[in-house]
Amino acid sequence: MTRGRFILLEGCDRAGKSTQCAMLIAALKEKGHSVELCKFPDRTTTIGQMIHAYLTNAKELDDRAIHLLFSANRWEAMQSMKRKLEAGTHLIVDRYAYSGVAFSTAKGLDLTWCKNPDKGLVRPDITFFLDLPTAEAEKRGGFGDERYEKRELQERVREVFLQLRGKEWVMIDARETVQSMHHKILREAEEKIRVGELDGRFAEEDDVLLDDMFID
Ligand code: DGP
């Protein structure tokens, strides 16, 4: 049995990540794959509840303290995510460490400092970046009341995201229709899964989970 693939969807607020995650999961399940959603921040844990209080402006926290909480929220999920991947379940992940670095760096923290706490997290096999110009994001019903839903910050977040672009990234234009984005994401995700399943075609290390997020 081959391990599951870690399929990440990243992007700015309002780009349609959650919709695309749901559609991808439904399509892969229909094709008989074992697949699960992981969403960050996971607001159900104790740490996640502190993050929720911060995002909804119910609680003030130092920028570095909240950065570390977002990172801890990913670390607390790591053992369970690894177990699932090793058991052959594909994980569709809605935001991850790239969001962590992009938001905090956009607020003015140092990029290298921001990467450090997430170093050593499991690395995604493929990252879809749903790219949406901030002006377009604003048109989508306007930003709501959560802390980061402000135009200038979102613009800086997008710039940092683009700076972080890794080898495993696939750019998706989030101005396209929901269906058109879905077809592209599904095609690439299936290809990633298929490649993982082909016996002997790939080097052994392709089947080892890499704990090297942000390690050069
Ligand atoms: P969501 O639940 O996907 O709508 O995300 C909530 C908000 O939190 C959104 O504005 C993006 C931001 N966010 C997500 N992950 C992180 C992170 O790791 N660090 C920081 N600072 N912000 C994040």
Image (spheres, grey):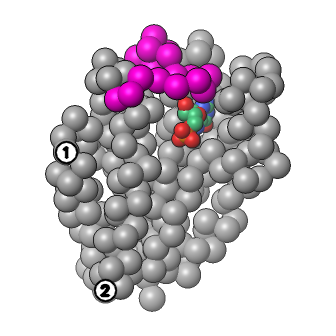
Whether residue 166 can be seen here: no
Whether residue 44 can be seen here: yes
Circle on res. 199:
2
Looking at the rendered structure, the secondary structure element under dot 2 is loop
- Magenta stretch: dominant SS? loop
Mark 1 → mark 2, Cα distance in angstroms? 36 Å
Mark 2 belongs to which amino acid?
Answer: Asp
Query: Mark 1 near ligand 1 (CB under 8 Å)?
Result: no
Residue 159, given in percent of the width and then of the height, sits at: 39, 20
Mark 1 or 2: in front is 1
**Within 10 angstroms of label 1, few (less than 14), some, or many (20 or more) residues?**
few
Image-based side of 66 in relation to 91, left or right: right
Mark 1 belongs to which amino acid?
Answer: Thr
Which picture quadrant has residue 125?
Answer: bottom left
Circle on res. 185:
none
On the image, numbered disc 1 is attached to which residue? 177
Image-based side of 73 in relation to 147, left or right: right
30 vs 39: above or below: below
Identify which residue is drawn at 61% across, 68% down.
Answer: 82
Magenta region? 140-155
128 vs 131: above or below: below
